[in-house]
Image (cartoon, rainbow, N blue to C red):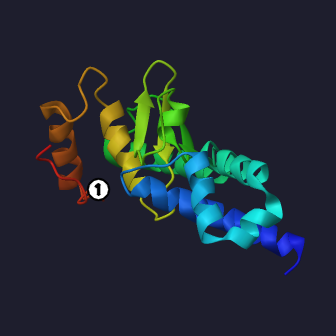
């Protein structure tokens, strides 16, 4: 295999491992992901070296995904009209791999997203398993009630309202 093919393979491995490790609940960091690559793919690791592999892991884990952000920005507009009668303020939607990192917290775990009311920003965590639009809708429900606390009765009532309208939120457990 040539260098370019190996780099493509390494980038795919970084992506898959980062998303997989984050989804386990234990989370990851770029250094931990790099360590797994070193153990699982020693030849590939040796070909590029620790510094390069860690940098690729950082680049992916701490990245925004502009194409996904644009897709969910459009979805926000549609969902706002469909389920909120267009009443939500014009939030900017940003899809990232590590939500906590972008929110200024220690990251590395799978986080569905966060609403920043001050900046009118909804940050959605990328999972690679097509749950981002459902997570967007959850955070839009949160955005509809800025005075509430996440998972308070106000949010539960909002989710029940959305479910009654046929919103794709059946994945939620309202017993939180």
Residue 113 picture location, percent across and down = 42, 41
Q: Quadrant of residue 45?
A: bottom right
Front in this rendered view, residue 85 or 168: 168
Q: Number of callouts in the render?
A: 1
Place of residue 158 in the rendered image (x, y in percent of width and height, measured from the top left): 21, 39
| Quarter of the image where one finds residue 159 | top left
Determine whether, in the image, residue 38 is placed left or right of residue 104: right
For disc 1, the neighbor class at 10 Å (few under 14, some 14 to 19, many from 20) is some
Q: For the point 66% across and 51% down, which residue is it? A: 57
Q: Is residue 109 visible?
A: yes
Horizontal relation, residue 97 to residue 170: left or right: right
In the image: residue 99, left or right of residue 163? right
The quadrant in which the C terminus is found is top left
Left or right for 66, reference 48: left
Residue linked to disc 1? 167
Which residue is painted at 44% across and 28% down in the image?
Answer: 89
For residue 41, above or below residue 15: below
* Callout 1: SS: loop
Residue 80, how many percent across, how many down?
41, 42
Residue at left 47%, top 18%?
118
Residue that lies at the very extreme toward the bottom in this rendered image: 1
In the picture, the quarter occupied by the N terminus is: bottom right
Evaluate whether residue 132 shows in this view. Answer: no
Q: Nearer the viewer, residue 16 or 122?
A: 16
Image position, residue 10 (x, y; %): 72, 66
At a point 60% along the width and 47% down the height, the residue shown is: 31
């Amino acid at each position: 295999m040539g260098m370019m093919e190996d780099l493509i393979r390494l980038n795919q491995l970084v992506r898959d491992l980062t998303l997989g490790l984050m989804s386990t609940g234990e989370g990851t960091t770029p250094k931990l992901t790099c360590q797994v690559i070193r153990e699982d793919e020693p030849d590939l690791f040796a070909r590029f070296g620790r510094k390069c592999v860690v940098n690729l892991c950082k680049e992916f884990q701490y990245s925004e995904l502009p194409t996904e952000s644009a897709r969910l920005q459009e979805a926000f507009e549609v969902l706002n009209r469909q389920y909120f009668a267009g009443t939500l303020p014009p939030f900017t939607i940003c899809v990232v791999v590590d939500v906590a990192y972008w929110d200024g917290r220690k990251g590395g775990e799978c986080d569905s997203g966060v609403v920043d009311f001050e900046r009118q920003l909804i940050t959605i965590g990328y999972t690679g398993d097509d749950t981002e639009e459902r997570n967007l809708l959850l955070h839009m429900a949160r955005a509809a009630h800025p005075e509430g606390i996440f998972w308070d009765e106000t949010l539960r009532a909002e989710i029940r309202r959305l479910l009654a309208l046929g919103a794709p939120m059946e994945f939620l457990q309202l017993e939180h």
